[in-house]
Image (cartoon, helix red, strand yellow):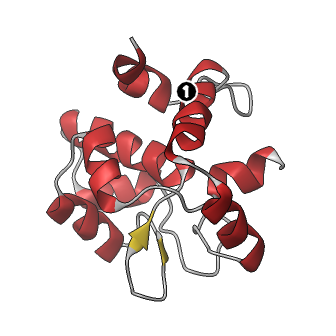
Amino acid sequence: MSDEIRRNMALFSIGSVMKLTELTARQIRYYEQHELIVPARTDGNQRLFSFNDVERLLHIKALIEKGVNIAGIKQVLNPVSKNSEDATVITEETAAKRKELTDSQVHKMLKQELLTGNRRGKASLIQGQLSRFFN
């Protein structure tokens, strides 16, 4: 499985994302409403988030902590539409692969992301934030 497919695969429920980012469900929905993230939706309308979504939420959280407002964040992070490359989508291929994954495999993928999180020449934003889950 290619790195981009893996990073955009819808894996995490909103509850998992809340634990990983320390954001509330309301905050996550607010950022979705402002098109800063676009999680995939299951047939039952449940949100599923990718590694890219988690990384983007952590970036938003860091900007908020620095005092940047939503308008400023929208300037820094371009809004994401459902048709853009950055949107998390569920395709037949990724849905099948997701069903094959066990919780321990998702945990391994997250741990590997933390260990090899370099992307486009820069360290992953989630590396420092999420490393506390694997000590």
**Viewer can see residue 63:** no
**Viewer can see residue 78:** yes
Residue 74, given in percent of the width and then of the height, sits at: 39, 60
Residue 97, given in percent of the width and then of the height, sits at: 71, 61
Front residue of 116/27: it is 116
Measured along the vertical axis of the image, is residue 105 above or below residue 122? below
Residue drawn at 75 percent across, 51 percent down: 4
Mark 1: secondary structure: helix
Front residue of 122/90: it is 90
Residue drawn at 27 percent across, 55 percent down: 15
Residue drawn at 61 percent across, 31 percent down: 113
What's the residue type where badge 1 is placed? Lys
Q: Residue furthest bottom?
A: 43
Q: Quadrant of residue 5?
A: bottom right
Front residue of 41/43: it is 43
Write down the residue under mark 1.
111
Q: Quadrant of residue 116?
A: top right
Q: Is residue 60 left or right of residue 84?
A: left
Q: Is residue 84 left or right of residue 45?
A: right
